[in-house]
Amino acid sequence: MDYKILITGAVGFIGFHLSKRLLNESYQIIGIDNLNNYYDLSLKQSRLEKLVKYNNFSFYKLDIKDKKIVDNVFKTHNPIYVIHLAAQAGVRYSLDNPYAYVDSNLIGFMNILEACRNYPVKHLIYASSSSVYGGNKVIPFSTNHNVDHPVSLYAATKKANELMAHTYSHLYGIPTTGLRFFTVYGPWGRPDMAYFSFTKDILAGRPIKVFNHGKMERDFTYIDDIVEGIVKLIDKIPITNNEWDESKDGISTSFAPYKIYNIGNNNPVSLMRFINALESALGKEAKKIYMDMQPGDVLKTYADVSDLERDINFKPSTTIEDGLKKFVDWYISYYKIQS
């Protein structure tokens, strides 16, 4: 296809899988990433090595907080679609390095919005997060619930992204879709995520830390399901609704060309079931240290994906057992673990 899609964070976990999928479908992909050292840089380099083999992939190492360079990429390539996945990730890291989130998630996103304004695109899809639900008690989390009580700076920046996107959709007619991802996992994943670090520790015979004494639940969502949802949404472009009324239309839509979706498995898994599934995939029992809850964490995430099902006829469905088995198979192969 001749469609040009710019993907920020193209060498990140989700960005890598999405880029690979779209490259295989012959889209022209412009990937940008700053290749920072938030986690193992060699893993990012390995992802990049796979992507640069494609003739339809162009890559720029840059930081999205640099407006001039971002504008130059837009001016050079004139992408038709933008999928913005670059961000400073991690809830706990935001307690120690708050300014990294301001630089990437606020200033960086502002630069992407301005570029989409000055070099118009058909659709901007951007990553939000399930963390925006913060202290909400009503489950499953719905895109029609208010998200005004974040419990981490990371969550606050993602909520801010949604507000910024709405403003640009209203003022400049940029169609925007925000995706609230729920605990994404799978091969080529982020080493700072629990399933990754647990795997490393279990194989090494080190104990794992089980927070809140295991009394937590997460709506784990397998990477292939996330990618499928994004791909199906590329051409699902929000439109202006001049008759919009929040009392009957809901707050995930607007009078502007704006939409928010949850992408989650719609099936929360207890932390202990997750650990048991990982133990089963590894064929090894974990040594466990039970800990209190950590600041910034939430007890449970659970995605209402009814509007995703309705609009694109899709619902994530990979079980935690199947997903973790695929991750472990990749992990053992990638790190050349001897059985």
Image: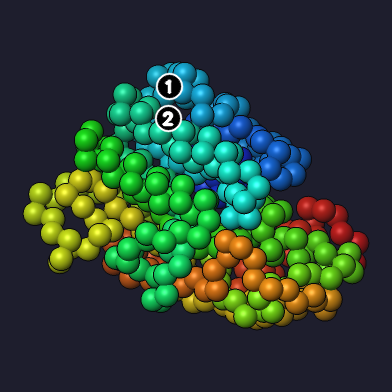
Residue identifier under label 2 = 111
Q: Residue furthest left?
A: 243
What residue appears at the point 78 percent right and 53 percent down from the top-left corner?
Answer: 334
Tell us which disc is closer to us: 2 or 1: 2
The label on residue 71 is: 1
Cβ atoms at labels 2 and 1 below 8 Å apart: yes
Nearer the N terminus, badge 2 or badge 1? Answer: 1
Instruction: Name the amino acid, label 2.
Output: Asn
In this view, the residue in front, 217 or 325, is 217
What x and y, as percent, mark residue 289? 80, 75
What residue appears at the point 43 percent right and 21 percent down from the top-left corner?
Answer: 71
What x and y, as percent, mark residue 335? 82, 53
Q: Which picture quadrant has residue 295?
A: bottom right
- Quadrant (top left, top right, bottom left, bottom right) of the N terminus: top left
What residue appears at the point 53 percent right and 65 percent down from the top-left corner?
Answer: 221
The label on residue 96 is: none
- Quadrant (top left, top right, bottom left, bottom right) of the C terminus: bottom right
Instruction: Name the amino acid, label 1.
Output: Asp
What residue appears at the point 35 percent right and 68 percent down from the top-left corner?
Answer: 142
